[in-house]
Image: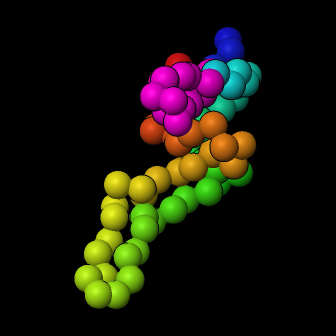
Amino acid sequence: MVKTLVIIILLFNGTVVKDHISFTPPIDVMDCWAFGNTYYEVMSTHRWGDQKGAPDFRFDAMRQGWYLNDGRGTIQGHYCE
């Protein structure tokens, strides 16, 4: 039986896509979840947001997230099938 890791991506043009990565067991659900987290670390870079400087020192958390290294968009989540 083939398992699939599905990565949910929000492209910068507003389109939501799902990247499917198939693999064969003996990977269980927890291994699949860890595989998804590893995908984040390899394929994207995390940003904490934008810190504004003086005089107000505001923090823009809306820019926080996992940005794909290929410049397509951001990772919104993942699940295993």
Q: Is residue 24 visible?
A: yes
In the image, residue 26 sits, relative to residue 1, either above or below, namely below
Residue 26 found in image quarter: top right
Residue 56 picture location, percent across and down? 26, 82
Residue 66 picture location, percent across and down? 53, 51
Q: Residue at x 29, y 75 (%)?
A: 58
Q: In the rendered structure, which segment of residues is drawn in magenta? A: 4-19
In the image, residue 62 sits, relative to residue 17, either above or below, namely below
Residue 45 found in image quarter: bottom right
Q: Would residue 65 be counted in the magenta stretch?
A: no
Q: Residue at x 62, y 24 (%)?
A: 19
SS assignment for the magenta stretch, majority: strand
Q: Would residue 5 be counted in the magenta stretch?
A: yes
Q: Residue at x 55, y 59 (%)?
A: 46
Q: Residue at x 52, y 36 (%)?
A: 12
Residue found farthest to the bottom: 54
Observer-nearest of 12 and 66: 12
Q: Is residue 33 visible?
A: no
Observer-nearest of 47 and 24: 47
